[in-house]
Image (cartoon, helix red, strand yellow):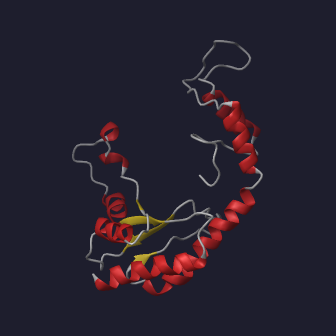
Amino acid sequence: KIITTGEGGMIVTPSPDLAARIRLIRGQGMDPHRRYWFPIVGYNYRMTNVAAAIGLAQFEQIAQHLETHRRVAAWYDRHLAGLQDLILLPSQQPWARHVYWLYTIRLHESVTIPRDEVMLRLDQSGIETRPVFYPMHVLPPYFEPGGRYPVAEKIASRGLSLPVHGLLQEEDIVRIAGQLKAILLGQ
């Protein structure tokens, strides 16, 4: 999600075995050495040449894109640091580095204003946000009658993503953080 290929995406791996498996899946599961033989169920995930060219050109800039997103995230970290009692900021594990496609926060239980109201007020200030994805068990294809996953439900109902893109400057983050603080502290 950090680079674009139009619609869709690409997978990059140093593993020859994983690359072969991915190629098999993306090519409708057809065996590359035995035409029209399908040892697995696959999908038609082949990109057009134009989309691939865009993706390769973007991939050449991935380090710059990652640096930009991480810089924006560092600004958010700095300017939202005083709100630890109201929001949970994104975190990283020692074995991984966050790419910050989204900068997702979660409202603490102490926050009484509904997440959707926070998003509406930010939108009224010209700040676009996104809700956290719905838990899978509530979506029609995967719906489980009586299924309860309280952690997933809490994250989904209290989480929102703040803007992250290459055109943001620190003063934009100061304004976004200021609006969020005003909303949460004013409840």
Quick check: 75 left or right of 112?
A: right
Relative vertical location of residue 165 with respect to residue 85 in this rendering, above or below: above
Residue 175 lies, in percent from the top left, at 48, 79
Whole-percent x and y of residue 85?
39, 84
Can you give x and y, in whole percent of width and height, for residue 35 in the image?
69, 12
Q: From the top left corner, tell me how far across and down residue 167 is, in percent.
A: 61, 66
Relative placement, left or right, of 64 versus 186 is right
**In the current view of this chain or complex, which residue is farthest to the bottom?**
82
Q: Where the C terminus falls, by quadrant?
A: bottom left
Q: Tell me: residue 138, above or below residue 119.
A: above
Residue found at x 73% / y 39%: 53
Residue at 60% x, 74% y is 169
Q: Is residue 145 left or right of residue 54?
A: left
Q: Residue furthest left?
A: 146
Quarter of the figure with residue 74: bottom right
Residue placed at 36% from the left, 58% from the top?
Answer: 152
**Residue at position x 27%, y 43% in the image:** 144
* 76 and 18: which is toward the camera: 76
Q: Count all numbered tags in the image, as a single digit.
A: 0
In front here: 119 or 97? 119
